[in-house]
Image: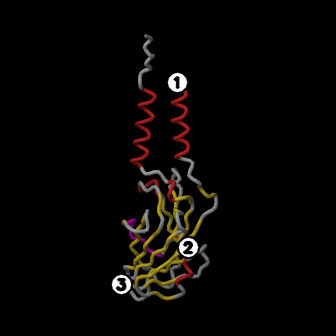
C-alpha cells in the first residue's frame, strides 16, 4: 500500500512540473503606452527587427505576452528574458517593472538602452522569479531622446497558469514527505 501511495504522490508531483514549455522563444503580442513616444507602437511586437519606438520621458510602455503565456525561469544561469533595444543616437535609462498577473508590477531594475549587441539579458533564477507575463518600461532619462525599445523576448516560454507558486510546492513537498515518513500500520485482527 505504501509503495502504491508513494508512486501516486510522485506521479502527482511530476504532473505539477509538466507545464508545457515551448522550445522556441515567444515575443510580446500586446502593447500599450501611457504617454508619448516616437515611432509605430506595434513595432515592439514580435521578433526584434530594428524597428523600434523611442519612449519619451516619464512615458510607460507595457508589453505583454499572449493570453496565459509567460516567460519562465529555466533553473540555469542562462537568460530567461531579453529586452531588445536600439541605441540611437544617445543612451537613455528606463525603469523596468515586471508582472506575473498583468495587474501588479514590481521593480526589476534600471537599465540603459546602450548595451552590448542591443540586448538586456535577464536571468529569473538569480532574481527568484518564476515567471513574467508582462513588462512595463518607463523612460527616466529626462532627455528628449528617450529609451529605444525594439522587442521583448521570452527565451523560455510556457503556460502561465501551470507555473507552480513556491507555497504550493512547499505544501506538496511536505505532504510527500509525510507520506514517505509515516510509519506502516498493520490492521488489527479481530
With 6 as the anchor, is 175 left or right in this view?
A: left
Question: Who is closer to the viewer here, 66 or 37?
Answer: 66
Q: Write down the residue under mark 3.
A: 142
Residue beneath the point at 57% across and 62% down: 155
Q: Write down the residue under mark 1.
A: 1
The stretch drawn in magenta includes residue 110: yes
Mark pair 2, 3: CA separation: 28 Å
Query: Which mark sits nearer the N-terminus, 3 or 1?
Result: 1
Mark in front: 2 vs 1: 1
- The spot of residue 3 in percent (x, y) is 54, 26
Residue beneath the point at 45% across and 83% down: 55
Q: Write down the residue under mark 2.
A: 29
- The spot of residue 157 in percent (x, y) is 56, 60
The stretch drawn in magenta includes residue 56: no
Residue beneath the point at 43% across and 19% down: 185
Mark in front: 3 vs 1: 1
The residue furthest right is 24
Does dot 1 land on a helix, a strand or a loop? loop
Above or below — where is 155 with respect to 2?
A: below
Amino acid at each position: 500500500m505504501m509503495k502504491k501511495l508513494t508512486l501516486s504522490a510522485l506521479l502527482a508531483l511530476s504532473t505539477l512540473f509538466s507545464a508545457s514549455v515551448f522550445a522556441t522563444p515567444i515575443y510580446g503580442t500586446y502593447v500599450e503606452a501611457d504617454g508619448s513616444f516616437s515611432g509605430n507602437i506595434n513595432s515592439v511586437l514580435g521578433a526584434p527587427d530594428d524597428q523600434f519606438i523611442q519612449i519619451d520621458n516619464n512615458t510607460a510602455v507595457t508589453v505583454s505576452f499572449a493570453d496565459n503565456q509567460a516567460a519562465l525561469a529555466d533553473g540555469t544561469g542562462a537568460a530567461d528574458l531579453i529586452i531588445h533595444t536600439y541605441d540611437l543616437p544617445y543612451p537613455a535609462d528606463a525603469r523596468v517593472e515586471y508582472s506575473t498577473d498583468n495587474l501588479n508590477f514590481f521593480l526589476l531594475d534600471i537599465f540603459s538602452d546602450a548595451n552590448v549587441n542591443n540586448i538586456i539579458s535577464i536571468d529569473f533564477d538569480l532574481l527568484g522569479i518564476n515567471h513574467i507575463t508582462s513588462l512595463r518600461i518607463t523612460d527616466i532619462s529626462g532627455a528628449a531622446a528617450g529609451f529605444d525599445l525594439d522587442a521583448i523576448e521570452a527565451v523560455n516560454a510556457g503556460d502561465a497558469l501551470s507555473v507552480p507558486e513556491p507555497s504550493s510546492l512547499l505544501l506538496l513537498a511536505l505532504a510527500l514527505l509525510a507520506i514517505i515518513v509515516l510509519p506502516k500500520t498493520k490492521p488489527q485482527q479481530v
